Amino acid sequence: MRAVVQRVSEASVTIEGREAGRIGRGFLVLLGVHASDEKADADYMIKKISGLRVFEDGNGKMNLPLSEAGGELLIVSQFTLYGDARHGNRPAFIEAALPEKAIPLYEYVVSSLRERFHVETGRFGSDMQVSLVNDGPVTILLDSKKLF
């Protein structure tokens, strides 16, 4: 599972001209599911997203997690995180999970994070327009298969 986590002062997602989700301060998470992902990959993402300490503390250091910063989450499915353009200019997406596997894992991540945070989402498989104000900018890449 891959995620691009951006610390934002605000973010929104629009589908077919209608706003589907909006948050203030928090994380915009673009989340992609790999064909080989399992629940353990989703659990890894939930733990990492919840625990990322990238909000400033009283000393101006990136030291606080989302919970202590009072942040929100906007989670948007993004199969293109598994685009492979190594062998040409048109990416192949064969590593991305098919919807029957990706949707339950995506929904599991969303529902688990909703237990602790205010979470807004896009709509899986839809053409979405995402707007954000990246705060910092701070952008973190997470990958459940690249465990160091």
Image (tube, rainbow, N blue to C red):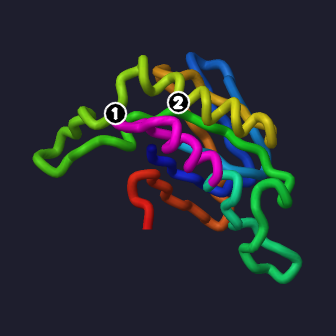
Which residue is disc 1 drawn over?
35
Q: Secondary structure at mark 1?
A: loop
> Callout 1: 10 Å neighbours few (<14), some, many (20+)?
some
Whether residue 48 appears in magenta in the rendering, the answer is no
Q: Is residue 106 left or right of residue 54?
A: left
Percent position of residue 89, x then y: 16, 45
Percent position of residue 108, x then y: 61, 30
Residue type beneath disc 2 = Leu
Q: Residue at x 69, y 59 (%)?
A: 51
Q: Is residue 36 left or right of residue 63?
A: left
Say if 48 sits above or below 55 in the image: above
Q: Which mark is residue 74?
A: none
Residue type beneath disc 1 = Ala
> Callout 2: 10 Å neighbours few (<14), some, many (20+)?
many
The Cα–Cα distance between marks 2 and 1, rounded to whole angstroms, is 11 Å
Say if 133 sits above or below 13 in the image: below
Q: Which mark is residue 105?
A: 2
- Most foreground residue, 104 or 17: 104
Segment tinted magenta in the rendering: 31-47
Q: Is residue 32 left or right of residue 14?
A: left
Q: Residue at x 66, y 19 (%)?
A: 18
Q: Residue at x 46, y 51 (%)?
A: 144
